[in-house]
Image (cartoon, grey):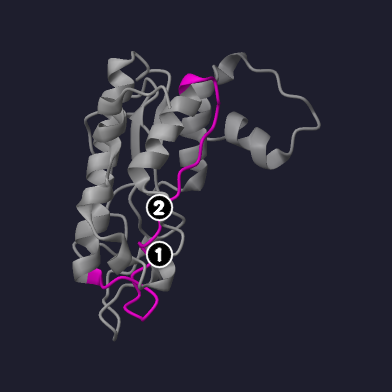
Amino acid sequence: SKEDPKTIERYDTSKLFDMKVLNRYNDMYRSSNLLGHQLLMARRLCEAGCGFVTVADAGWDMHGNQNSLPRLTGMEPLGNQVDHAVSAFLEDVEERGLSDKILLVITGEMGRSPKINGKGGRDHYGNMTSLCFAGGGLNMGQVIGRSDRQCAHPATEAYGPKNLLATVMHTLFDTTEMRLRTDIPSTVSELITDGHPIPGLL
């Protein structure tokens, strides 16, 4: 690699936890690619002109069973890795003058239940989840929306996948100037014609 060794070190998350311990859990079998290494590769791909990069991070499915990390002790290694790797990515991108050109989106396919299950874990939950945007020319440094006291339902306006996708679309195109082909699937065209980006970000 021609990458500066200091940059590689900056992204390194291998010292934050013992991979042998984490690999005892079946849900962690995909975790051989540490998050820091993946985000460094993502930055290099974006810098080379790749338009869309997906990075996956395993281990968050904390049901409290034998396949998943314990809810209490599992949060520390996973959370520390995200904190370290994402900070390294954002600082690196900013130093390279790419903050407005690269949009980082952190999300999952669902939230976690506010109620702890009988095994001490949290199950899949569709009513609430968190979402993070960084860069892409969006207005940063703010928290939009809040939950009720139980973290069970939105206490402010609810935003869903269509709002997420519409926000991303608006960072890529001036949607007011677009002309859409008639053969574009309606699931895509409606994001542009009818989709509403999350207010306050644009």
Quarter residue 72 falls in: bottom left
Pick the quarter of the image with the N terminus: top left
Q: Residue at x 64, y 17 (%)?
A: 178
Quarter residue 113 falls in: bottom left
Residue 66 position within the rendered picture, expressed as x and y whole percent measured from the top left: 36, 81
Q: Which mark is residue 28?
A: 1
Label 1 SS:
helix
Can you say whether 39 is above or below 7 in the image? below
Q: Is residue 56 magenta?
A: yes
Question: Which residue is nearer to you in this view: 11 or 83?
Answer: 11
Q: Label 1 near label 2: C-beta < 8 Å?
A: no
Q: Is residue 45 left or right of residue 129?
A: right
Q: Residue at x 22, y 50 (%)?
A: 15
Label 2 SS:
loop
Quarter residue 115 falls in: bottom left
Amino acid of disc 1? Met
Amino acid of disc 2? Asp
Please rate how many residues cluster around mark 1, counting C-alpha atoms within 10 Å: few if below 14, some from 14 to 19, many from 20.
many
Can you say whether 162 is above or below 3 in the image? below
- Which residues, given as a range, are shown in magenta? 47-71
To which residue does mark 2 refer? 57
Question: Which residue is nearer to you in this view: 185 or 190?
Answer: 185
